[in-house]
Amino acid sequence: FKYNMTDVAAAMGLVQLERATELLNKRRSIARAYTQAFTGIDAIELTTVRDFDAHAWHLFVIKLVDGVAKIGRNEVIEMLKQDGIGTSVHFIPLHAHPYYRETYHTSPSDYPVAHDLYLRSISLPIHPRMTEADVDRVIVAVQQALR
Protein backbone atom coordinates (compact mmCIF):
# COMPACT_ATOMS: atom_id res chain seq x y z
CA PHE A 1 0.00 0.00 0.00
CA LYS A 2 1.12 3.51 -0.70
CA TYR A 3 -0.20 6.02 1.81
CA ASN A 4 1.15 9.36 0.67
CA MET A 5 -0.14 12.43 2.43
CA THR A 6 -2.05 14.84 0.20
CA ASP A 7 -0.60 18.30 -0.38
CA VAL A 8 -3.53 19.87 1.48
CA ALA A 9 -3.04 17.60 4.50
CA ALA A 10 0.69 18.35 4.47
CA ALA A 11 0.05 22.11 4.33
CA MET A 12 -2.37 21.89 7.25
CA GLY A 13 0.10 19.76 9.18
CA LEU A 14 2.91 22.28 8.69
CA VAL A 15 0.73 25.11 10.01
CA GLN A 16 -0.28 23.04 13.03
CA LEU A 17 3.35 22.05 13.61
CA GLU A 18 4.26 25.73 13.93
CA ARG A 19 1.69 25.94 16.74
CA ALA A 20 2.72 22.71 18.49
CA THR A 21 4.39 24.38 21.47
CA GLU A 22 1.48 26.78 21.96
CA LEU A 23 -1.06 23.93 21.81
CA LEU A 24 0.96 21.75 24.19
CA ASN A 25 1.33 24.60 26.68
CA LYS A 26 -2.43 25.15 26.65
CA ARG A 27 -3.04 21.46 27.39
CA ARG A 28 -0.45 21.56 30.18
CA SER A 29 -2.18 24.58 31.69
CA ILE A 30 -5.53 22.77 31.71
CA ALA A 31 -3.92 19.65 33.19
CA ARG A 32 -2.36 21.77 35.96
CA ALA A 33 -5.74 23.33 36.77
CA TYR A 34 -7.42 19.91 36.91
CA THR A 35 -4.61 18.45 39.01
CA GLN A 36 -4.71 21.31 41.51
CA ALA A 37 -8.50 21.13 41.77
CA PHE A 38 -8.72 17.35 42.16
CA THR A 39 -5.72 16.78 44.42
CA GLY A 40 -7.05 15.93 47.85
CA ILE A 41 -10.37 14.51 46.62
CA ASP A 42 -10.21 11.02 48.09
CA ALA A 43 -12.58 9.60 45.46
CA ILE A 44 -10.22 10.51 42.59
CA GLU A 45 -6.89 8.94 41.66
CA LEU A 46 -4.84 11.14 39.34
CA THR A 47 -2.17 10.22 36.83
CA THR A 48 1.29 10.40 38.35
CA VAL A 49 3.68 12.50 36.30
CA ARG A 50 7.28 12.45 37.44
CA ASP A 51 9.47 15.54 37.21
CA PHE A 52 11.50 14.09 34.35
CA ASP A 53 8.43 13.09 32.30
CA ALA A 54 7.17 15.15 29.36
CA HIS A 55 3.45 14.41 29.21
CA ALA A 56 1.53 15.40 26.06
CA TRP A 57 -1.83 15.60 27.88
CA HIS A 58 -3.79 14.47 24.86
CA LEU A 59 -6.12 12.94 27.46
CA PHE A 60 -6.78 13.75 31.10
CA VAL A 61 -7.98 10.56 32.78
CA ILE A 62 -9.27 10.39 36.33
CA LYS A 63 -9.76 7.07 38.06
CA LEU A 64 -12.48 6.68 40.66
CA VAL A 65 -11.26 5.10 43.88
CA ASP A 66 -13.21 1.93 44.52
CA GLY A 67 -14.98 1.98 47.87
CA VAL A 68 -14.48 5.74 48.29
CA ALA A 69 -16.45 7.14 45.36
CA LYS A 70 -20.12 6.93 46.28
CA ILE A 71 -21.19 6.54 42.66
CA GLY A 72 -19.72 4.67 39.72
CA ARG A 73 -18.14 5.80 36.49
CA ASN A 74 -21.33 5.67 34.45
CA GLU A 75 -23.20 7.78 37.00
CA VAL A 76 -20.44 10.40 37.00
CA ILE A 77 -20.46 10.46 33.19
CA GLU A 78 -24.25 10.90 33.18
CA MET A 79 -24.12 13.72 35.75
CA LEU A 80 -21.49 15.55 33.71
CA LYS A 81 -23.52 14.98 30.55
CA GLN A 82 -26.54 16.59 32.27
CA ASP A 83 -24.30 19.64 32.83
CA GLY A 84 -23.40 19.70 29.13
CA ILE A 85 -19.93 18.25 29.67
CA GLY A 86 -18.84 15.49 27.33
CA THR A 87 -16.54 12.80 28.66
CA SER A 88 -15.13 9.63 27.17
CA VAL A 89 -14.14 6.15 28.20
CA HIS A 90 -10.83 5.44 26.52
CA PHE A 91 -8.71 2.34 26.60
CA ILE A 92 -11.48 -0.22 26.42
CA PRO A 93 -9.60 -3.45 27.10
CA LEU A 94 -9.41 -5.97 24.28
CA HIS A 95 -11.23 -8.65 26.25
CA ALA A 96 -14.29 -6.35 26.39
CA HIS A 97 -14.59 -6.03 22.60
CA PRO A 98 -17.12 -8.39 20.99
CA TYR A 99 -14.59 -10.00 18.62
CA TYR A 100 -12.33 -11.15 21.45
CA ARG A 101 -15.23 -12.12 23.71
CA GLU A 102 -16.82 -14.23 20.99
CA THR A 103 -13.69 -15.61 19.29
CA TYR A 104 -11.52 -16.26 22.34
CA HIS A 105 -14.24 -16.47 25.01
CA THR A 106 -12.53 -13.87 27.16
CA SER A 107 -14.09 -12.62 30.35
CA PRO A 108 -13.34 -9.83 32.83
CA SER A 109 -11.94 -12.36 35.29
CA ASP A 110 -9.19 -13.24 32.77
CA TYR A 111 -7.85 -9.67 32.98
CA PRO A 112 -8.91 -8.31 36.37
CA VAL A 113 -6.56 -5.31 36.48
CA ALA A 114 -7.45 -4.10 32.97
CA HIS A 115 -11.14 -4.60 33.69
CA ASP A 116 -10.93 -2.75 37.01
CA LEU A 117 -9.20 0.25 35.43
CA TYR A 118 -11.72 0.26 32.60
CA LEU A 119 -14.63 0.44 35.04
CA ARG A 120 -13.08 3.29 37.04
CA SER A 121 -11.59 5.55 34.33
CA ILE A 122 -13.09 8.70 32.83
CA SER A 123 -11.43 10.98 30.27
CA LEU A 124 -12.28 14.61 30.96
CA PRO A 125 -12.36 17.25 28.22
CA ILE A 126 -8.93 18.69 27.48
CA HIS A 127 -8.28 20.59 24.28
CA PRO A 128 -6.56 23.86 23.39
CA ARG A 129 -9.77 25.72 22.59
CA MET A 130 -11.12 25.34 26.12
CA THR A 131 -11.49 28.64 27.93
CA GLU A 132 -10.74 29.17 31.60
CA ALA A 133 -14.51 29.22 32.17
CA ASP A 134 -14.84 25.84 30.41
CA VAL A 135 -12.15 24.35 32.62
CA ASP A 136 -13.75 25.79 35.76
CA ARG A 137 -17.13 24.38 34.72
CA VAL A 138 -15.65 20.88 34.37
CA ILE A 139 -13.90 21.18 37.73
CA VAL A 140 -17.05 22.28 39.57
CA ALA A 141 -19.16 19.57 37.92
CA VAL A 142 -16.68 16.81 38.84
CA GLN A 143 -16.38 18.10 42.41
CA GLN A 144 -20.17 18.20 42.78
CA ALA A 145 -20.61 14.73 41.31
CA LEU A 146 -18.11 13.23 43.74
CA ARG A 147 -19.16 15.02 46.95
Image (spheres, helix red, strand yellow):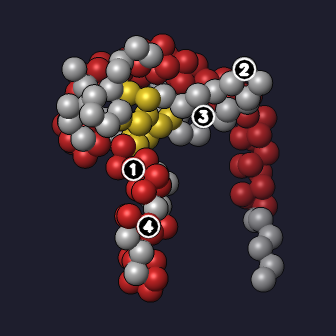
Q: Name the residue under label 4.
A: 110
**Front tag of 3 and 4:** 4
Calculate the distance from the C-alpha at mark 1 to the C-alpha at mark 4.
11 Å
Q: What element carries label 1?
A: helix
Where is residue 141 shown, x and y percent of the image?
A: 27, 24
The reply to whether callout 1 and callout 4 are in contact (CB within 8 Å) is no
Specify the quadrant of the image occupied by residue 49.
Answer: top right
Quadrant of the image containing the N terminus: bottom right
Quadrant of the image containing the C terminus: top left
Calculate the distance from the C-alpha at mark 3 to the C-alpha at mark 1.
22 Å
**First-in-chain label (3 vs 1):** 3
> Which residue is rendered at x = 46% and y = 62% of the image?
111
| 125 and 14: which is toward the camera | 125
- Name the amino acid type tagged 3: Trp
**First-in-chain label (1 vs 2):** 2
Q: Name the residue under label 2.
A: 51
Calculate the distance from the C-alpha at mark 4 to the C-alpha at mark 2.
35 Å
Q: In this view, does 101 lie above or below 116?
A: below
- Name the amino acid type tagged 2: Asp
Q: What element carries label 2?
A: loop
Q: Mark 3 points at which residue?
A: 57
**Front tag of 2 and 3:** 2
Where is residue 8 shown, x and y percent of the image?
A: 73, 58
| 79 and 128: which is toward the camera | 79
Q: In this view, does 13 lie above or below 111?
A: above
